[in-house]
Image (cartoon, helix red, strand yellow):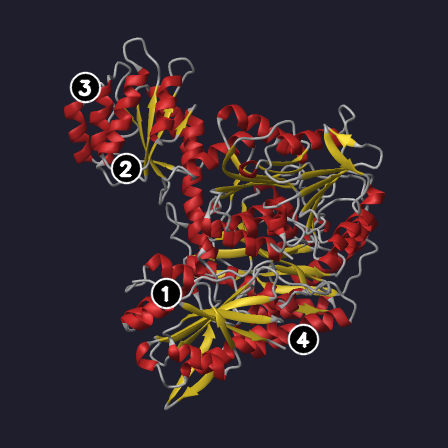
Amino acid sequence: MTTRNLDALFEPRSIALIGASDRLGSVGAVLARNLLEGGFAGPVMAVNPRASSIRSTLAYPSVAALPITPDLAVIATPAATVPGIVSELGQRGCRAAVVISAGFDAAARRDLLAAARPHMMRIVGPNGLGFISPRRGLNASFAQLTPAPGGIALVSQSGAIVTAALDWAAPRGFGFSHVVSLGDSADVDFGDMLDYLALDPQTRAILLYVESIADACKFMTAGRIASRNKPVVVIKAGRGAAGARAAFSHTGALAGSDAVYDAAFRRAGMLRVEGLRELFDAVTVLTSGISVAGDNLGILTNGGGAGVMAADALEARGGRVAIVPEAARGSLSKVLPPQAALAGPVDIIGDAQPDRYRAAMEVLLAEPGADALLVLNCPTAVASSEAAARAVIEATAAAGRSRPVLTCWLGEVSAAPARRAFATAGIPTLETPEEAVRAFMHLADHYRGQQLLLQAPALPGLPDRTAVDAARATVAAALLAGRDQLTLPECGAVLAAYGVPTLAARAFDTPEAAGAEAETLACPVALKILSPDLTHKSDVGGVMLGLSGGEAVTAAARRMLRDVSAARPSARIDGFLVQAMVSRPKTEELIAGVIQDATFGPTVLFGRGGVSVEIEGDRSIGLAPLDDVLAEDMIARTRVARRLAGYRDRLPADRPAIRKVLVALSQIALDLPEIAELDINPLLADSEGVLAVDARIRLRRPADGYRPAIRPYPTGLETWIVVGPSTVCVRPIRPQDAPGLITMIDHSSAEDVHLRFRSGLRHLPPSWAERLAHIDYDREMALVAELPDGSLAGVARLAADPEGETAEIALMVRSDWSGRGLGAKLLTALLDHAKARGLKEVWGDVARENAAMLGLAETQGFTLGQGSDPSRRRIVRQLS
């Protein structure tokens, strides 16, 4: 449903309050007060069968008695009565309802939705606080106050968090565009709200309080679209409560649900914070108009201690203190006293007057090394904090805001006037060095998130399909045999099919056969028990390393059989595994794996491996699909990344090989959803490459309707067409096509560009090209025509509405390819995709003077009507 009928929620012309009351302290009384006194311009009609009036307003005994049909109903009656009321409202034509009532079990929620669905009626709740739209004077909640209008939208699953946030925000001057308490989210959920708020002109930033996500694909699609338009900041409850799984694998133990939520928020371009204060601090700095492109922070202070505190906080959060270059130090030495510290942080000493701040800032703002400058002030008796603030404001303005500036004036009484001055000047100001650094790192993290948001992995270099089919057959055979695990040789075969280097392991039934293999290998070997019931074999004596010779291995196998049988008498023993020992003394032990998360689907894990992997807890998580950029981001977010960079006598590890493994695991997770957990530990990595020494794979049967939270690149849509003498590849667009789009526009006539973009645009800006080339493949699709030389000759684009029923289309063919039939073939391919997706209608607005496109549309079965303005024609085609 998504945004359908949400206009009735946020822009109603009339409202009915069912369950209105005058009883002091009741929910119905608070709702009546908030609705009737909030300033809503339309009629608010109270419904109460036992009252003739509510707060001096005429009351009606039933929905049927209402004089007009309400756009919006607010319901606060016992849960058992709600489905009937909703059905009655829907029959009258009401389009949205806020259900405050609590006490709905699963069956009652189904009844509620069944009553609403025939009328396309939207439901917020049940068991919620309601919602508030201050700009409309609309308070359909039982919150204790109505917030001031502003540009922040708050969406929460907890009514208590809403009331706390409103109470906290009011004295600090924060205003809201909308405040929505989702309650049980039986219908309207986070995805719906993100879709609506992404395009709401009154909303500049979106704040979320999340406890759980029901539809991950919908949430990720809506979240990525919203994050491209405005900051989305989220608090996720339950960080400490998300315990490790009772693990089949180390990957399963480490990939707790909260860590996966972290990865999902990051992939969606959202910024996660810890609490309400940090939530509002983050949105303040993100909406201030400043941005950074890195984590290198210059620090200027009049107190050494404050500078050290800021530097410590910066290092703890993974940022870097900007070091002042030698030339700039020379310039500073001319304007600062001899006692000043010049390298960074720059300490201009406690007696610093405004001119000293101004002079130091002129030098530092002209230095390109730092991504931003943090200016701190400690109150002293010999200098005015407010005058210092005025100097900082003047220096920032004189530099033309060439470098982002954040401020931190410590204290309360002396700092208050300075903070007001900074707020008036639009310069972010924080109260403590730690908060200021945190705000800067929010900017840096948001920038990184926006860059990763542009990644839509095309998954190049897919594995040989014959090998993949063999891997599928291995998995299918194990499931058919009733097994939920693969043996080590089977795990190796699956990994090898996707190009992951593995250490060969052979299985043998008897100690004597294992000994014979060791004799053949003529090198030290590892001996492991083969059992489907033993996950961590070393815990029961099922692993022995460094054995040499057949006799030693045979004896060790017999001893292992006795020890394992004694420790786990119920375990099935299928034999032994023999592997040649690896001698790579300067390798790092890593872990890499896959888990099918219950909410977000295929998830990849990376970190430091070995036997102490859970104790180390050094890991990062990413959602499939991955590409090189996303894989590198996963590696960089671990502590072991510093070891992989090389140290002392160890050369840097082969990072491309590690990235290749992570991308391969991502593809395995997408191709083989039957794999519930996959664990490579250790994955050895050094300058010569990587090697998977041990692996575990647990199987499951995927649930019906399984789909990943992020759609991978749809290779199935790639095809070849013949256009005149040329063979052209028609395929989905990739992020890497952004330069090709720029070139395509550059090689098109000004008239053709104007007809497509409705502006005087002549050259496609790189940022615009990146947006056009990065799509989610869920609601959006763009098919490009790629010529043999790699250039693009045309693009056909489809953007479906959130409900998945209609879609807007657009088409452009490079000028020198017009008139060859390419446009018709691109449009046909796009329509075929639209039909396959189940869309009911496609439409587009075409310039009246674009005779070629209008003619093509008619030949393709479109009807022509009036467009969005008199200069346009709307083309519409119904799809069977």
Which class describes the residues within 10 Å of circle 3: few (<14), some (14-19), or many (20+)? few
Provide the residue designation for mark 3.
Answer: 338
Q: Quadrant of the C terminus?
A: bottom right
Provide the residue designation for mark 2.
Answer: 401
The residue mark sitting in front, 4 or 1, is 1
Q: Which numbered disc flags the more N-terminal residue, 1 or 3?
A: 3
The residue mark sitting in front, 1 or 3, is 1
Q: Please identify the residue farthest to the top as the structure is shown.
A: 381
Amino acid on which disc 4 is placed: Ala
Which class describes the residues within 10 Å of circle 4: few (<14), some (14-19), or many (20+)? few
Question: Would you place residue 780 above or below residue 641 in this image?
Answer: below
For residue 396, the mark is: none
Q: Which residue appears at 68% of the width and 68% of the height?
A: 507
Q: Which numbered disc flags the more N-terminal residue, 3 or 2?
A: 3
The residue mark sitting in front, 2 or 4, is 2
Q: Mark 2 to mark 1: distance in Å?
A: 32 Å
**Is 158 left, or right, of 371 in this rendering?**
right
Secondary element at tag 2: loop
Count of marks, rendered view = 4
Which class describes the residues within 10 Å of circle 1: few (<14), some (14-19), or many (20+)? few
Among the 4 quarters of the image, the one containing residue 632: bottom left
Amino acid on which disc 1 is placed: Phe
Amino acid on which disc 3 is placed: Pro
Provide the residue designation for mark 4.
Answer: 473
